[in-house]
Image: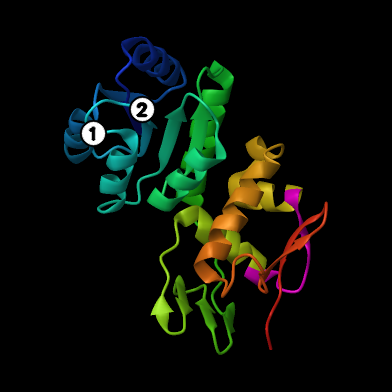
Amino acid sequence: MADKVLIVDDEPAVLELVRRNLEKGGYRVVTASDGQEGMRALYAERPDLVILDVRMPGLDGWQVCQRIRDMSDVPIIMLTARREEADIIKGLDLGADDYLTKPFRKGELLARVNAVLRRARKGVIDLSGVTYEDDYLSIDLSARRVAIDGELVQLTPTEYRLLALLVENKGRALTFRQILESVWGFEYLDEVDYVRVYVWHLRRKIEPDSRHPRYLINELNVGYRFEPQR
């Protein structure tokens, strides 16, 4: 059965455009015109993906995203009028999986939806036995467990995939292209800023001082590496 997508947007023209394009792409579509209606549809329809507008009156996209993450890991794509880093970082804090800037092309919409759903189905490559531990940071990839000084750290699915890739290749520099293809998919090979923003966000969660990282090291004009502290 085709995947079901819930679209939440208060602009009727955008709602209809996204609905029509997704249905032509083979998806089943459920729509909601505000945040409250979107939450009701989430409970009733159990979609495989949510496309969520940021700017809505009343219950806005940020609040809806946070409420969804309190109860579900369903993938979320945020729709935003401007691709500002502050909005991306806020979305990461709340657990969004991707962003799409209005106006968008039909092909771009379908490519992003396909990629996010593919990542959700694929999950993380089996990394049983891949672990890391020092006096500060503990990572057990098979158990999906990351802890700082014994306190568990909550990571989004994308953050976990990124950290898993870097730890699996610890001590080795991975290029932006390698990271994008492995974590996001081939549709994202030009999105170098995605890697930078997610690494920055991940540093905030696991580094003792995110301004002076010791684990997630930038290889200038190349990419990143995970540096063991032993």
Q: Which residues are magenta?
A: 167-176
The quadrant in which residue 83 appears is: top right
Between 209 and 46, the residue placed more toward the observer is 209
Residue at point 18% right, 32% down?
36
Side of 54 relative to 157 (left or right): left
Q: Position of residue 24 (x, y in %)?
A: 44, 15
Residue at point 60%, 49% (across, down): 197
Residue 5, image quadrant: top left
> Distance from label 2 to label 1 (Cα)?
9 Å
Callout 2–callout 1 Cβ contact below 8 Å: no
Q: Is residue 34 above or below residue 164?
A: above
Magenta highlight on residue 150: no
Q: Determine which quarter of the picture holds residue 50.
A: top left
Q: Is residue 134 above or below residue 179?
A: below
Q: Which circle marks residue 59 in the picture?
A: 1
Instruction: Name which residue lies at 45% across and 70% down.
Output: 144
Which image quadrant: the N terminus? Answer: top left
Crowd around label 1: few <14 · some 14–19 · many ≥20 (10 Å):
some
| Image coords of residue 44 (percent x, y) | 16, 36
Image quadrant containing the C terminus:
bottom right
- Towards the viewer: 83 or 156: 83
The amino acid type, in three-letter code, at marker 1 is: Leu
Name the kind of residue labelled 2 in the image. Arg
Please state if 84 lies on the left or on the right of 117 as rendered: right
> In this figure, which residue is indicated by the disc labeled 2?
55
**Secondary structure beneath disc 1?**
loop
